Structures are given as C-alpha cells and as structure tokens.
Image (spheres, rainbow, N blue to C red):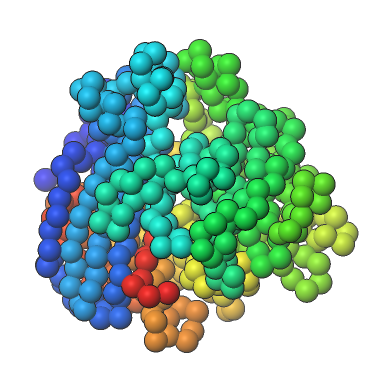
C-alpha cells in the first residue's frame, strides 16, 4: 500500500511526515541480521509530531516534540515513543484543540493560555541529547526540556535559573573537556548569547555577542580553540510575525558574516569575515589549525531552502557540502565546494568534534525537493583520500539523519555503525537500519523492525551505556 497525498493538507502532515498519536512500548523487536552486541545503550530521535489539527498554515518546524527511542542491549532491541509533554501541549490537551499558531501563521492564544504558558509553545521538537547524565529535548526558540531515560517529561531545564533565553538545538560536546558549548538567539536584544556548561552540567559562562540585527541561527561550530557563528540573512521581522505575516525572511542584501571567537573571549574579540549571501542549516565539524586558520565544513545552500510565510520558493536551493577557511592572520575567508550532490543532516564521530575529522556522514538524496525534505541514502566522505561512498537504503524510502555510534573496542575513526530510521513507503513501515560505517557498500548489519511507522523527523543521538 503506497501513501496517497491529499493536496489540500500540508505535505508535512501526511505521507511519511504524518504524525502518529499513540505512545507505544514494544520489547524484543524482530531483527533481520544481527545487532552488534557492542551496541548497548539508547538511540533517541526527536521530531515534530503535531498533536492537534493546526490553527492556521502548518510549518514543518511547528509540531509537538515526540521522541522515539530504541534501547539496544546484548543484541536485542526495544522501542518506546512519547510526546514531549510541554506546558503548551498539556494546555491544549485540556482544551481538546490547538491553542497556538505556528511559524507560518502566528496567532495570539487567549489570555488564560498566555498567563499559563506564554505566547508560544516550547515544542522541544528538534534534537535530543544527553549531557551530564541529563536527557534534554531541544528547540531553538526556548530552553531545553528535560526527559527521563524512559522519556517521561520532567520539565524545562534552565541550569538552576542560570540560563537566560533559549538554547540552540545544536549544542556541541567537547570530547576533550566534557563541556557543552551552545548559544541562544532571540528576536530581542541581545540577539545572540554564547554559553558553556561544564562536564558536571553547571552553566559556567554566558557571553552576549553583538549582531546588527536579529537573525535565525540554527547551528554553529566549536573547535578546540574557537567558536564560529554564521550571521546569515534569515532576518526576523517580529512585527510582521505578530500580525500573522512572514516572521523570518530571506534578505540577501544584508550579506553574510562569519564570526570567529576565541572560546574564552568576549564580543569584542570576534573576528568577522564578510561573504556573499548563502545559507546553512547544519555544520559537519570545524577545527583550528596551528597556523592561524579556522576550517569549517557544512551544508551550504544558495539561499534559505525553506520559507516561513505563504511565499513559494521558485529557485532550487539544495544544500551541498562546502568548506570555509578563515585565516585569522590575513583576515580573509575562502569557500570551497566539496561536493555538488545535495546533502544535509551531517554527522561525525562525536569524539572528533572540534578537531580535524577524516570522515563525515551526510544524509543524501538523488532527488532534492525544496518543499519535500527527504533523503534516501547516506554518503560517507573520506577527507583522507578525497573520496566518498554512498549507501542507498532502498527504492521509495524516506531516510533521516545517520547517527554515528562508535564501536567501544574500535581504534579507527570510522570503527562503528550508522543508525538511521528508514521508512519504506510501499509498506508504510519503519526500520532502524544499522550499517557498518567502515563499509557502506555492504548490506546492513541489522534491520530492526519497529512496531509502527516513525514519521520523518529531525535529529537524534546514540547514548551508550558508558562514556
Ligand atoms: Fe537541525
């Protein structure tokens, strides 16, 4: 049975994006192949899963957070999924309907709801991480939401009140220090704030960074010595948003700036590099060299590849892997395209974050569509040899981000596995597909058959039992 699409409904509420409403627990899942016994831990993946019919136009980023977890132990797998029970969702459950507008069509909730929740819902729908033994569901417009390992929602987590404002959904773990580095952006001044939490999960540093205007900043880069912010012209217009218009607009006339900041520096210490307009949602990695350069790899698109209003994208804006090199000694920045094939959702072995990685993994597709984000494979880049290899998960499949899970007994950077939730559109079922990261040409090591379809989602992480 294939999935028929209804042209009157948002593409992000149907087909492989259609939300699921039940919360399941299933043990001892059927497996084709063999789950490596060394994979002991939990893989969690977050995504937007709208609980109630939306009030207005639905944006792909709007839905309520839902975390899908695969618990792997001694070659067996169990599954659980839960909504992130945000204050907004709890209020909506009480009302029996949606109370909040979305990014494409904002509407003010009623006064009671504003008093109880605020004007927006913290959907916590974008990523889920573990740091200092806390499980945090993240959405860039709000603080983290803490979950238990079994996916109960514990509430918003603000580092004992020390975190003011939001946290990006793409914080960076420093494998050398155990710190978590992150930023928060806001449509109100200060537009950008950089934070560090130490390995024990205590917020130790918060620094305001000056920006000329409020912009949407989805991701950043932390090297062993620097943090790098990309000030790209996805510009906030709060007045337009609050009156139901387009709140985030692509305004290339503002140009692009890449800011490099020493990790212990302040706003005055940022070196800015100006470039012609482009857009990036996600970075693969970055590192600082001994001769004063900072190198960043990421998925560059010629413009913002999504819209936040009712305008239609007419240009193709597929992201592909690029490298920026900022020379702090000469003040110049160069851009190099590493591949012209579309790809995004880049990941590395987390133990190489902030230092020069040899291998990177991108979700890739042979058919990029601006309004139907979909991947069917994973491409492994080998910067050591300058080669790449691609694993296509099948025909008529929808795959997501391939997360690298290191082999605890491994020594090489690519000793490990790639975990991905892959939906077969013909059967409307989802498998956790486990590939050997060393050999993408090989058939999957294991396919874990989930008891239900998992909607296309955003980001997740492998959280091994011991770290
Ligand atoms: Fe993201």
Instruction: Pick whichever, 329 or 210, lies toward us.
Output: 210
Q: In the rendered image, is residue 260 in sight?
A: yes
Q: Residue at 49% across / 28% down in the picture?
A: 308
Percent across and percent down for residue 365 are 40, 54
Q: Quadrant of the C terminus?
A: bottom left
Q: Which quadrant of the view contains residue 100?
A: top left
Query: Where does the image place residue 298, in percent across and percent down from the top left?
Result: 58, 56
Residue 148, image x, y percentages: 31, 54
Relative to residue 148, is residue 190 drawn left or right? right
Please indicate whether residue 399 sits to the left or right of residue 176 in the image. left
Q: Is residue 256 above or below residue 74?
A: above
Outermost residue toward the front? 160
**Residue drawn where x is 57% and y is 62% of the image:** 198
Name the image quarter holding the N terminus.
top left
Say above or below: 29 vs 140. below
Please, is residue 458 above or below residue 252 in the view?
below
Numbered circles on residues, count: 0
Q: Position of residue 227 (x, y in %)?
A: 68, 56
Residue at figure coordinates x 33%, y 73% from the top left:
465
Report whether 437 appears left or right of 273: left
User: Vertically, is 1 above or below 451?
Assistant: above
In the image, farthest residue toward the right: 330
**Residue drawn 29% across and 39% down?**
85
> Does residue 126 appear in this view?
no
Along the viewing direction, whichever of 404 and 5 lies nearer the viewer = 404
Q: Nearer the viewer, residue 154 or 466?
A: 154
């Amino acid at each position: 049975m294939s999935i028929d699409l209804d042209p009157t409904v948002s593409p992000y509420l149907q087909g492989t994006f259609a939300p699921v409403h039940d919360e399941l627990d299933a043990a001892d899942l059927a497996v084709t192949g063999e789950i490596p016994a060394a994979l002991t831990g939990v893989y969690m993946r977050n995504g937007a899963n709208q609980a109630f019919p939306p009030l207005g136009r639905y944006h792909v980023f709007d839905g309520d957070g839902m975390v899908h977890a695969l618990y792997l132990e001694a070659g067996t797998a169990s599954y659980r999924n839960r909504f992130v029970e945000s204050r907004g969702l709890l209020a909506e459950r009480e009302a029996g309907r949606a109370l909040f507008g979305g990014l494409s069509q904002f509407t003010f909730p009623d006064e009671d709801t504003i008093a109880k929740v605020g004007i927006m819902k913290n959907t916590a729908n974008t990523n889920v991480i573990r740091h200092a033994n806390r499980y945090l569901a993240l959405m860039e417009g709000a603080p983290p939401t803490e979950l238990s390992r079994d996916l109960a929602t514990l509430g918003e987590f603000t580092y004992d009140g020390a975190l003011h404002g939001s946290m990006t959904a793409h914080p960076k773990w420093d494998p050398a220090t155990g710190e978590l580095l992150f930023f928060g952006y806001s449509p109100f001044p200060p537009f950008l704030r950089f934070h560090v939490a130490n390995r024990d999960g205590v917020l130790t540093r918060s620094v305001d960074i000056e920006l000329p205007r409020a912009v949407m900043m989805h991701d950043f880069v932390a090297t062993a010595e620097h943090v790098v912010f990309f000030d790209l012209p996805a510009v906030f217009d709060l007045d337009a948003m609050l009156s139901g218009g387009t709140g985030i607009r692509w305004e290339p006339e503002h140009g692009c700036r890449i800011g490099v900041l020493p990790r212990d520096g302040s706003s005055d210490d940022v070196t800015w590099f100006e470039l012609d307009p482009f857009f990036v949602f996600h970075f693969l990695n970055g590192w600082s060299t001994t001769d004063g350069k900072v190198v960043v790899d990421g998925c560059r698109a010629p413009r913002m590849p999504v819209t936040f209003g009712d305008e239609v994208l007419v240009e193709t804006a597929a992201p592909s892997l690029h490298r920026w090199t900022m020379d702090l000694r000469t003040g110049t920045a160069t851009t190099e395209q590493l591949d012209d094939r579309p790809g995004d959702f880049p990941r590395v072995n987390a133990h190489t974050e902030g230092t020069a990685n040899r291998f990177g993994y991108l979700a890739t597709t042979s058919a990029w569509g601006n309004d139907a984000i979909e991947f069917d494979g994973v491409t492994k880049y080998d910067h050591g040899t300058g080669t790449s290899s691609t694993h296509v998960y099948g025909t008529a499949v929808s795959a997501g981000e391939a997360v690298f899970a290191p082999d605890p007994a491994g020594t090489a950077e690519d000793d490990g596995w790639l975990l991905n939730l892959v939906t077969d559109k013909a059967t409307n079922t989802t498998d956790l597909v486990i590939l050997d990261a060393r050999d993408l040409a090989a058939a999957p090591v294991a396919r874990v058959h989930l008891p239900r379809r998992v909607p296309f989602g955003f980001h997740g992480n492998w959280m091994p039992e011991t770290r």
